[in-house]
Image (cartoon, rainbow, N blue to C red):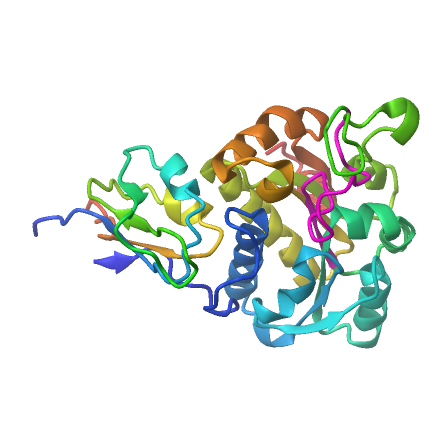
Amino acid sequence: MQTTKSHPKSLFPVSTHYCAGCGHGIAHRLIAEALDELGVQDRTIGVAPVGCAVLMYNYIDVDTIEAAHGRAPATATGLKRVRPDCIVFTYQGDGDLAAIGTAEIIHAANRGEHFTTIFLNNAIYGMTGGQMAPTTLVDQKTETTPYGRKPSNEGFPIKACEMLATLDAPYYIERVSVATPAKIRRAKKAIFKAFNYQVEERGFTFVEVISTCPTNWGMSPPDAMKWSVEHMEKVFPLGVFRDKGAEKDRTETGADK
Amino acid sequence: MPETKKPYIEIVTDRCKGCELCISACPKDCIELDTSVVNAKGVNPAKYVGGCIGCGSCMLICPDVCIELYKEEKIQKSA
């Protein structure tokens, strides 16, 4: 008998502080597996966000810097420029990346900085208790929009992938989900590809992970996963928004794969 | 050819938070909450009740990396 997959080496075998059924745990594991498979754990530096994943360094076994709220891309820019041999990634939530850190991520992407951003989107502010986030869906009820988000008052959800895909510099942009085992497999491939492009020094890579917040959505974890498929994926369609690597391969080989 | 053993899973119940995602992901209803046990987290952890087909869905969806799947390696057919 053989284990098909043992605990990733880059992930501490500890219990996380995340609520039961939170997608952060799945995303952490996918990152750890990607780092293990690339064999870059000892030269990886993570940049932790402000939000639920603020204690990321307790779970992912790599050197980690804690950035000011939303400034993870700015910190990562400095790190990567000083230590270009290191693999640098930022791990940010929707409050961190799409609200307070919008300027940082857009300009880091526009400069084509050679780091990877993993953006966890669960359409709500998790750590502070379920307030409206920029990615909250229209009519979604939160603590600060108790009658549902109204576009006339609070605007529409921000689509980070589409926004960054209007820039020329980003090398790879994909949106994935962790709602079902099949989608997790696809998410793993996307995260691996993003880190692999960074190892090959190709450019800025960005993976948005559609996740859940069962506690603040007021649902059981399986219901939250279903809700994210039924509602979130309509507003945030999954898919590849930019993959210059695949385009390059196509032009080099002269064949459509 | 040696007899192929059935796949099975092992659950690290100490880390389990009882989120039931593995139960919802399992296509064969092989997992249920163990109501006779309360773990250090204060919840009823998941329990394997048999019938695993080795698809690995529970292992993939577990947010706390509690599940390990054991199955025989695929034997390559010789040409």
- Which x, y percent locates residue A182? 47, 36
Measuring 32% from the left and 41% from the top, which residue is drawn there? B55
- Which x, y percent locates residue A215? 59, 43
In the rendered image, the quadrant that contains the C terminus of chain A is top right
Q: In this rendering, would A39 be left or right of A169?
A: left
Please, is residue A57 above or below residue B71 in the view?
below
Q: Nearer the viewer, residue A17 or A30?
A: A17
Q: Nearer the viewer, residue A244 or A222?
A: A222
Q: Please, what is the dominant secondary structure of the magenta stretch?
A: loop
Please, is residue B41 above or below residue B26 in the view?
below
Quadrant position of residue A141: top right
Residue A123 magenta: yes
Q: Nearer the viewer, residue A86 or A182?
A: A182
Measuring 50% from the left and 70% from the top, which residue is drawn there? A12
Q: In this rendering, would B8 be left or right of A170?
A: left
Please, is residue B25 above or below residue A104 in the view?
above
- Which x, y percent locates residue B1? 7, 49
In the rendered image, the quadrant that contains the N terminus of chain A is bottom left
Q: In this rendering, would A7 be left or right of A104?
A: left
Residue A29 magenta: no
Measuring 51% from the left and 49% from the top, which residue is drawn there? A20
Which segment is the magenta one? A116-138
